[in-house]
Image (spheres, coloured by chain):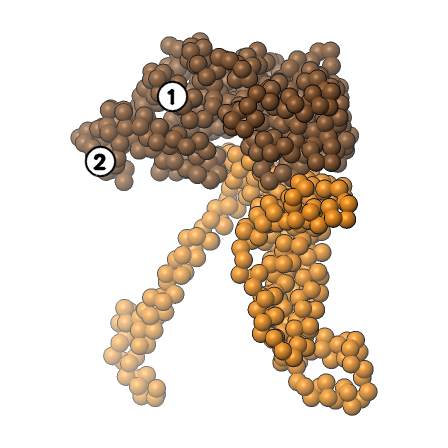
Chain colours: A orange, B brown
Amino acid sequence: MTKSDHQMRDDTAATLPARLLGPQRRNLWFWVFVGPFAIGLALFTYVPLLWSVYLSFFNAHNTVNPTDFVGLGNYTAMLSDDAFLSSLGTFLLFTAFIVPATYALSLSLALMVNRLRFAQAFFRSVFFLPTACSYVVASLIWKLSIFNGVRFGLANTVLGWFGVDQTAWLSTTSPPWYWLVIVTVRLWLQAGFYMILFLAGLQRISPQLYEAAAMDGARPGWQVFRHITFPQLRATSVAVVLLLVINAFQAFDEFYNLLSDARGYPPYARPPLVYLYYTALGRDQNLGLGSAGAVILALIIAMATVVQARWFGLGRKED
Amino acid sequence: MALAGALAAACGSNTGRGGGGSGPALSQWYHQYGEPGTQQAVKRYAAAYKKADVTVQWRPGDYDRQTAAALLTDSGPDVFEVNGPLLDQIQGGQVADLTDVVAPVRSDFNQAVLAPKIWQDKIWGIPQTVDTQLLYYRKSLLKDAGVQPPQTVDALVDAAKKLTTSKVKGLFLGNDGGVGVLGGTPLFAAGLSLIGEDGKVGFDDPAAARVLAKIRQLYADKSLLLGAPTDWSDPAAFVQGLTAMQWSGLWALPQIKKALGDDFGVLPFPKDGTGGRPSVPVGAYASAVSARSRHKAAATAFAKWLWVDRTDFQQDFALSYGFHIPARLSLAKQAGQLQDGAAADAVRFATEHGYAEPLLWTTADRNAYQDALSRIIKDGANPESELKAVVRKVDAELQRVKKK
């Protein structure tokens, strides 16, 4: 577009509606395309979010239009609630285990698949397939057929061959076998996806680096991995860890489907989302208290994300 | 929508939303009953009502949550069954007062299940049917092990231990070891209650810790079946021989009878200690009217017609599909299916030893108590200190609800 073009447009279309429409009606088209999403986002995300913050300052039992203002009462109640605090502990424990475990497992799968000379596509697909399975379905399979507590459950059958007594995997708290069930279902479901990310990362590493390392006398195996492969995967690793932590924050499906029953949820392995679900949306319908918990959780997540971003130098230019 | 509804009501025209009646359009909600035929039956009842056009909604899934959410809006049900109504629903003005509707036949209702529907001398729900839970035991297995049907909690602990073999467990209280289903049952067995007559915590007593320690003993002895494919409410584990005794609902009785013939008996939860008594939990889904209904009067009239006047339908609903005790004493007496064998025992237990969770026992109380129960049973936590924490919580909760 030339300068005189602009000049002409400005002169002829100086009226307000025309200015609102913008050059070539760009503003109009912007809103035609963005508007529906923006409205949807506002209506279904921001309004409920702000409403929830509003509710958190009220005594809101069985109502979303509360009148009984309690100030920070719900927040102090939530922060002095042992069950909520222990749910935060549960969640930290879960994250501290599942993030490194998935990272290590998917990286090793990727390294193994990457070395394959034949049938690589086959194994890549096989390991990736579980990603397509729903958490709910997988949880039910884990709960009802693999790790059920009776003698004909798969795990108990196998252990039975070695003369081991049947174990009630999800009902036993000492030792806490339920963690085995929860962690394995998640590992099975998500390891394949992160393996694909690592594979992509591995294939981007220039072969010349390995050649140069070989020239310098680096022994294949650990030394090459430690000094070439692992550092070269830094960008992928950062992305994987971030995604894993976010996924761990959202943990709900497998916990709920593995451990809840018609009468509620046990006090162990209860992450904050499950606890809040019961507080706010269960028979309790304590929407004020639940909202306060959600706000606290959101603040914790926001802080953790900021710290992580700083730590990894996210957003900084790649050097 | 509101306008259309009002017009339809004014003209008394049939809106064509199914059903047979004319007059205002009402929607009635039920949770999904497992027994075949129930859905057709409730639709038949609704169609027989001529003064309103009643549409039945049969709602699978988490019914309590669905109604709780729907009652916050204008598009909820007019008449609905509810495992309550809960105190917070009543205090929140979500359900209509049905005192006048029930009043003429008030004494004919099973008083144990009617009591939790009453708040400040007003009745907020009409009990539909009485459900109860019992201890089923396999006669042949007990005989083989030389065990008598247990009459005390101590005997129950011993019996479950003796009946446990490498293939069969002694007792099934649900996959969580009884945490969910037992509720206040052991407390009642020890002669205590959840909330006392005086409106104070009913289990602030050493006997409570003693009886819960015995439930822990069952778990520690490894006498309990855990991790079965179905939970306590389903008789499958008992019928398949995974357990010699099972705590389950009255509704399971026909299935058990079909599978095992006469090789089973029923017991109440046995008593504990000197002040104890056998304990049988009873409860009733109630029919309630939404306070936000656009046709509250018509909805109330319909609820009265179905759950007070039409005793034939009430009888049919209780006994033709599932297996429940009618909530009306006069109907329970007439019911042929409840006259002999284990069913008659069950009805007698429910009448003599039945207790219902009081209205003041809120969900927050129940959650706190269940958490403590889980820690006592599974982790072997100290019952006294766990209960002390629950008592504090329940005290605070009582203060909250009484303030309103």
* Visible residue check, residue A57: no
In the depicted structure, whether residue B251 falls above or below residue B70: above
Left or right relative to A99: residue A41: left
Left or right relative to B108: residue B382: right
Q: At 54% from the left edge and 58% from the top edge, which residue is drawn? A: A133
Badge 2: chain ID: B
In the depicted structure, whether residue A84 falls above or below residue B352: below
Q: Where is residue B81 drawn, in percent x and y?
A: 42, 28
Name the residue type under label 1.
Asp
The image quarter containing residue B243 is top right
Q: At 41% from the left edge and 60% from the top edge, which residue is drawn? A: A38
Q: Which label's residue is closer to the chain start, 1 or 2? A: 2
The image quarter containing residue B381 is top right
Q: At 55% from the left edge and 23% from the top edge, which residue is drawn? A: B261
In the depicted structure, whether residue A238 falls above or below residue B386: below
Badge 1: chain ID: B
How far apart are the alpha carbons under marks 1 and 2?
Answer: 29 Å
> As rendered, which of B86 and B21 lies closer to the eye?
B21
Q: Quadrant of the N terminus of chain A?
A: bottom left
Q: Where is residue B114 drawn, in percent x and y?
A: 48, 17
> As rendered, which of B15 and A30 lies closer to the eye?
B15
**Residue ID for mark 2:** B15
Q: Residues within 10 Å of mark 2 (few under 14, many from 20)?
A: some
Secondary structure at numbered mark 1:
helix
**Residue ID for mark 1:** B316
